[in-house]
Amino acid sequence: MAGLGKTYVIAFAGLKPGQHEFEFEADNKFFAFFNDPEISRGSIQVNVSLFRQATMMVLNFRLKGIFDITCDRCATGAQMALAGEHQLVVKLSEPDGSEDDEVIALPLTESEIDLAPFILEYIKLSLPARKVPCEVSGDLSLCDQEVIEKLNLLKSTASEGSDDRMSRLKNIKWS
């Protein structure tokens, strides 16, 4: 990851067995490097707890911060909070194809691991499925009221012109 340098790299070869703590920040430069359409701006604190063993490492990621979104309801820009916890197990052995989402294998000759792609993946996994900040905060004024009024008008117009096929189906008596 030439654009990010060694900012998100942990040189684990020199670490003694046991617990080690690391702190990173995924900021606007981080998101710009990946050029991901889902998240382009934010400030996410990433705390990594690394438990080192002879042939294995367990990394626990704790994410907390804010990110810029476009509201799914009214298309207004806003900020939302993000928090999440994820775990990655790294086996130090020859890759044997038994990797999955939470377990990866690194060759014994490796001496460092770049966490940037894992941090991005865990941030994306921590994103809410629906990005509607007014629902989260309970503050309906966060949404663009003009857009909401137009949506309500379209909704009422659509319900007036709808046919009653579904209501007729509900009235069928099944024996």
Image (cartoon, rainbow, N blue to C red):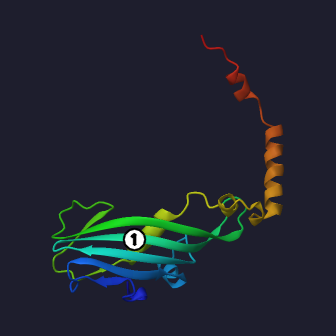
Q: Which residue is mark 1?
A: 61
Residue 157 occupies quadrant: top right
Image height of 104 relative to 167, above or below: below
Res 27 seen here: yes
The quadrant in which the C terminus is found is top right
Image point 40% across, 78% down: which residue?
Answer: 116
Residue 51 in percent (x, y) is at: 27, 73
In the displayed orientation, state which residue is furthest to the bottom. Answer: 5
The image quarter in which residue 142 lies: bottom right
Is 62 on the left-hand or right-hand side of 69?
left
Q: Residue at position x 79%, y 47% from top?
A: 155
Q: Is residue 7 left or right of residue 94?
A: right
Residue 60 coordinates in the image, percent (x, y): 35, 69
User: Looking at numbered disc 1 in the image, what kind of residue is underneath it?
Assistant: Phe
Q: Position of residue 110 (x, y in %)?
A: 21, 80
Depth check, front residue: 103 or 98: 103
Residue at the far front in the pictured view:
18
Label 1 sits on a secondary structure element that is strand
User: Residue drawn at (81%, 51%), measured in percent from left and top?
Assistant: 152
Which one is in front, 3 or 113?
Answer: 113
Say above or below: 14 vs 146: below
**Which image quarter is the N terminus in?**
bottom left
